[in-house]
Amino acid sequence: MSWKTIIIKDGERVSLFLNNFVVENNNMKYHIPLDDINAILFENYKTTITTRIINKLAEKKILTIICDVDFKPISIIQPIEANHMQLRIINNQLEWNKEDKLYLWTQIVRQKIEAQIDILKLNLKDINKIQLLYNYIEELQFSDVTNREGHAAKVYFKELYGHDFTRDKENHINAALNFGYTILRHAFARTIVSKGLHPSIALFHHNMYNAFALADDLMEPFRPIVDNYVYKNVMNIDYFSRATKLELVNLLNSKITFRDTKIYLTNAIEKYVDLIINYFDTKDISNLFYPIISSVEYYEL
Amino acid sequence: MVFYDLPFDTKQNVRSYNTFRNNLFKEGFHMMQYSIYSKVCYNKESVDFVIKRINKFLPKLGNVRFLTITEKQYQNIKVVVGKKSNEELIIDDRRLIEI
């Protein structure tokens, strides 16, 4: 049912009234039905939030992201009990077989590189580099022990954003990429938690400081959606503006082809996580589908 | 859109009016004018779903009616006297809102 994305830019106070999300601003009150809301981004660091609405947002599994003074997304709101079969699902997750996990991870890496090829093709990039990425897919080994993912990413980023580009430099492209990835990552974390899974118990990522390792694993094939947007719209300007930021949040509203139908990205993420759970139940990889990254249609603001 | 006229003569009736109105708010309706409430739904299924839910908390007495119109028809409303409330300007079928 939920479809609205709300950005709190000037809202001074946020509260709950009869299942409605109430934003007060300059003595004006706006009511928005909670059931309609898919995501909320708090940008104004002076907004007051009541505890009632915090709990309600968690309960309704609304993706709530709160930004810091410098507009970087820092915290999200998540419920303690997200699913009525919580314990059973987490127990299942703990018992996921290591072989199965790594097999899935290999598939995800393959899919990620294919999505990267998709984006390079879409933007008419050098055919030799595309061939190189195809070679990496060929060479891909179980659990990606030879780190083809890293090599592919290096070639891909250099080809897409120019030869001097690296991911660790501080510039507007990286700022935009990081922001876009964060939105996507939290969207995944929300969906994962709402399915009853634990976001820290992952397939491959196992940094002990990473609370959302599973989100990081699963989102890999979706990253090129952000890359492509940044390539088309941020490359030609020389700073990271607020308008770009809104557009990146708005990526959640873009439409994408998933199993031959066009659906919104947030719904695609949910279906994809369902298929992952289904894979662990059935051990059948042929039932796992990925969205077609080049089919993204951006939603006009 | 939901239109209603409800009796106000007894305490009992006032109470059932209040419950009905609060339930409309909980369902996500907002007041366009007195006794006229509206809600934006994004497809036919969600309209049917909402109507089904309203049917569960209807008051016993009075006069209540539903009307389903498209967003385009709704935007064509001509306001002759007065103006649209600020809330109405924000609530439409856009998927991204800034407040």
Image (tube, rainbow, N blue to C red):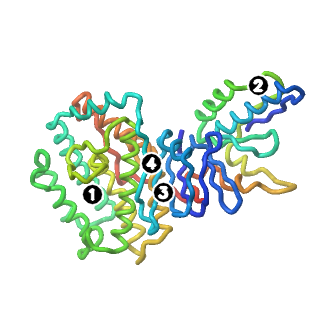
Name the secondary structure under disc 1.
helix
Measured as percent of width and height from the top left, residue A274 is found at 35, 35
* Residue located beneath label 1 in the image: A116
Q: Which mark is residue A193?
A: none
Quadrant of the drawing holding the C terminus of chain A: bottom right
Name the secondary structure under disc 2.
loop
Question: Cα distance, mark 1 to mark 4?
Answer: 31 Å
Measured as percent of width and height from the top left, residue B32 is found at 76, 46
Q: Which mark is residue B59?
A: 2
Using the image, name the chain to which the residue with label 2 belongs: B
Say which quarter of the image contains residue A259: top left
Label 4 near label 3: C-beta < 8 Å? no
Q: Earlier in the sequence, mark 1 or mark 4?
A: 4
- Residue type at mark 4 is Ile
Say which quarter of the image contains residue A159: bottom left
Classify mark 3: residues with Cα within 10 Å, few (<14), some (14-19) or many (20+). Answer: many
Both labels 4 and 2 in a single chain: no
